[in-house]
Image: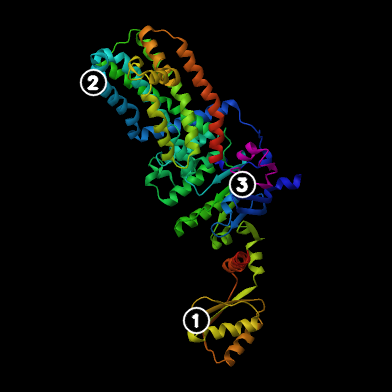
Amino acid sequence: MADTIVIPASERKLKNRVGVGRTISSISTFAYRALLKMFKNPEIFVDFVVLPVMFTLLFAFLFGGAISGDVRSYLPIVIPGVLLQASFTNCTTAGTKLREDVDKGTTSRFKSMPIAQIAPLAGSLIADLVRYVTGGITVFTMGYILGYRPEAGVHAVVFSILFMMLVAWCLSWVFAFISMCTKTISTASAIGVVVMFPLVFLSNAFVPAETMPDRLRFFVLRINPLSRVVTTVRRLLTYGAIGADFWFTLFGALAILAVFIPLTLYAYKRKA
Amino acid sequence: MENNAVLAVEAHGLVKTFGRNRAVDGVSLSVPTGSICGVLGPNGAGKTTTINMLATLSKPDAGNVKIFGYDVLRETHIVRQLIGLTGQFASIDEELTAFQNLTIFGRLYGYSCKDSKRKANELLEEFGLGDAMGRSLSKFSGGMRRRLDLAVSLIARPPLIFLDEPTTGLDPRTRTQMWRTIRDLVKGGSTVLLTTQYLDEADQLADDIVLIDRGRVVANDTPDGLKRSVGSSSLHLTVKNADNAADAARITECVLCARVRLAKASELTAPMDDIGKLTDVLTALKDAGITLSWINIFQPTLDEVFFALTGEGSKDKKEENQNG
């Protein structure tokens, strides 16, 4: 029981900063914690398995005939759309787990510990990557079952899932920030729905923009950045190529990340 | 500098305001290494706000804190390596098992996977939670949770431990267990600063008591010193006929020149500086024709200190409010 003897403060070697190695290890510990909790609550799988399945079926059979003549030829349009919707809906709830920790007071304990202050935040959001990937795989599996065979092949599918994961992850920092600023968790989720729902539907995710009235088409193609994301994925899956939209989306997402990491950290520190 | 290093906590003139409310208003305290300091006060006195500033959770609006000589604001990360904090909050995850909770915190404190598992097992044994290690926390009793919470702050064996109301809501048995654990911590070389609203807890555990009321330190002394400050002992009288209680109180007040409290309808208590005055009281009561059914002299308890020091305070406050 040598461990029970406390080393006096004066005999400890102490540094007033956290090393990079320790930070990475704390982040992965927090990610592990978030994953453990995720798998203890199977109902959250509804968000990233059941909903994508439902939406793929719903859109394919409801709109397939009307938009593309038949379900099968609608799939190249709707699968990237559902992929976007699944990922982006998931990222609106990114901050809720963090906010629960804040409200319960768990973060107070984390704050009093010798760890990097960003670790609980980053760990929790990194664990969310699992959700985006699961969502993506679900969407493409559904597509495959319905007969969707992307021209560019399997590696384009993998690349699309990873690309969408990255974009959604960058965006999730915005929603983590919002959840740290609102009074309650439910306000934050409400903001997530109110912002995301119109943006997803007023894009080319489910319907080709060509059929839209002029002004709406202008908004959908020129203003709504989500259309660029969908276009990128469609191009990837069809031609296996990346274009200007890809770089626009990628740099946009990284810019959001660069702005919102410090903002979210600031809000989180204030709240905890 | 050498002398400063001996103090585990040294705080000067801490102030924290929330809006217009000065939750902590100039608190100073010092805790020597290896002692237990009890911060005692009623609800809302500013105990938790004070502990939060000491434990690097919130920045004081004014004043400064040194933990083992390290400045809380400038050397925050060093301070965090020296302290363990068990707050009133639930810092453990309900969804996870006790073992998982402890290993996660072990990893966060920088231990390897293997070491965190070993530490988790050791702590669970030490805290009598060995049988429950695999169980989900939702099946834990309040006392078990509290112990697990404390175990988490002991993973790194910090030399200074903050305990915010460690026994609030515990039954007498688990409370005694908790007291024993806290005493063992100090035997192991730790310094403990705890807050409590229970006077007997402070009396039982603390080497020094800091009495806080409305954000200010109203007294700072050893438990015995505090007791002495309200009078060496107290007189308890029970009158046979409750109708005479008011008269008896008035007479006793006259003789002792001290405030008499009516505990029950027929019971009165008064502080007594001079035991010799006992005969005067009894004679005066006899002359007034009041018969007593019971009489006793008690050593003062912290309750009396508490009421004497904070009770007066709340009266001042009312007057302030009326004047303002």
Q: Is residue B46 magenta?
A: no
Calculate the distance from the C-alpha at mark 3 to the C-alpha at mark 2.
60 Å
Query: In the shown orientation, is residue B232 left or right of residue A127?
Result: right
- Horizontal relation, residue B121 to residue B301: left or right: left
Q: Nearer the viewer, residue A73 or A28?
A: A73
Q: Are marks 1 and 2 in contact (CB under 8 Å)?
A: no
Of B270 and A183, which appears nearest the observer?
Answer: A183
The magenta-colored residue range is B53-80
* Badge 2 amino acid: Phe
Q: Are marks 3 and 2 in contact (CB under 8 Å)?
A: no
User: What residue is shown with label 2?
Assistant: A61
Percent from the top left, x then y, of residue B201?
54, 60
Mark 3–mark 1 Cα distance, whole angstroms, equals 46 Å
Q: Position of residue A163 (x, y in %)?
A: 43, 17
What numbered label is drawn on residue B53?
3
Q: Chain of mark 2?
A: A
Q: Amino acid at mark 1?
A: Ser
The reply to whether residue B186 is in sight is no
Q: Position of residue A2 (x, y in %)?
A: 57, 40
Residue lying at the far right of the rendered structure = B1
Same chain for labels 1 and 2? Say yes or no: no
- Compared to B108, does B137 lie above or below? below
